[in-house]
Image: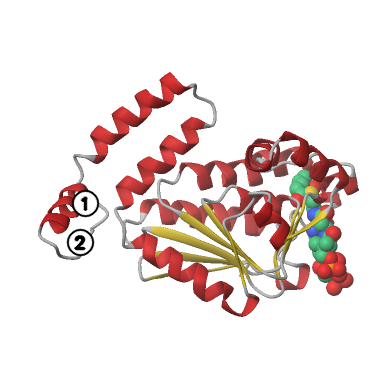
Amino acid sequence: MSLKFIVENGVGKINFNRPDVLNSFNKEMALAFQKTLKDCRDNPEVRAIHITGEGRAFCAGQDLAEAIATDGPGLENIVRDHYNPIIMLLREIEKPVVCAVNGVAAGAGANIALACDIIFAGASSSFIQAFSKIGLIPDSGGTYFLPRLVGFQKATALMMLGDKVKAADALAMGMIYKVCDDAVLLQESVECAEKLAKMPTKGLGYTKRALNLSMNNNLEEQLKVEGELQTTSGKTYDYNEGVNAFLQKRPPVFKGE
Ligand code: T3D
């Protein structure tokens, strides 16, 4: 099985599971990941998603043996049919996606991490835009997310040079949310996902939608989006619960509705 998946405490927990090849993606793993993300999207019991890798790596990107195999899926199909749907799902699922980078994240593996909502990284982990070293261009949304996260100049250099960026440097340049000791990475990132799973899921989903739209909107368009989504949020069960709990001085019990 190229992926491990369980639902626990409201969190869909996905582990890449090809540790012998540093969890690099072959067709089977890419399609299994897409299916599991869709299951998470459609299952109301899943109110947050947590993604990490088995073994010593998060993900080393495309399985290069498959990429050059004469009977393999072929480069243009790999990008179109494997990675592009994964990145769209990660951004379009209106539930928080937490990622725990537990070792190297290279190529598409790095950019899948960057498409997640909240990125934790182990202190010994690293991020590599490995594409330039083999004559490819960054895919899986890398040219979209990285310049927006760290700035155009830094993104250009990282993508052209293929530097190995240590977790602490990734944090300093705004690429990720938090660095944890390796020993507590899983515990801290899962705790974060489980906390998010108890929060107002619809409100978090609309927040994600607004952030997605902010990538391309001007201020006027974005203010309109905020107004519309705030009105929609105000009609949710969880908004009513949140306000009543505050006024009654009790902890809220959100249902994700
Ligand atoms: O069709 C297309 O290709 C389009 C799609 C492109 C998307 C992409 O992601 S392109 C970028 C692909 N990824 C890479 O170029 C990274 C390749 N890997 C590495 O550079 C290094 O493995 C790392 C820097 C990630 C880690 O280095 P290190 O020294 O810690 O580990 P290692 O010894 O290189 O790797 C351990 C094993 O995993 C090794 O196998 P072995 O010798 O024990 O049998 C190695 O071959 C295997 N492995 C690592 N990455 C890949 C891989 N096998 C297949 N594909 C990989 N990407």
Look at the numbered disc 2 and give the secondary structure of its residue.
loop
> At 80% across and 45% down in the image, what residue appears?
158
Which residue occupies 39% across, 67% down?
194
- Report if residue 193 is visible in the image: yes
**Residue sitting at the far bottom:** 183
Q: Which residue is mark 1?
A: 238
Query: CB under 8 Å between callouts 1 and 2?
Result: yes
For the residue marked with disc 1, what is the amino acid?
Asp
- Foreground disc of the pair 1, 2: 2
* Neighbourhood count class around disc 1 (C-alpha, 10 Å): few under 14, some 14–19, many 20 upward: many
Q: Is residue 81 above or below residue 6?
A: above
Find ligand 1 in the image and state its quadrant: bottom right
- Relative depth, front residue between 98 and 155: 155
- Return the disc, 1 or 2, that comes first in the chain's sequence: 1
Which residue occupies 20% across, 61% down? 252
Is residue 184 depicted above or below 127 in this figure?
A: below
The x and y percentages for residue 94 are 40, 46
Find residue 78 and report its image quarter: top right
Q: Quadrant of residue 79?
A: top right
Look at label 2 and name its amino acid: Pro
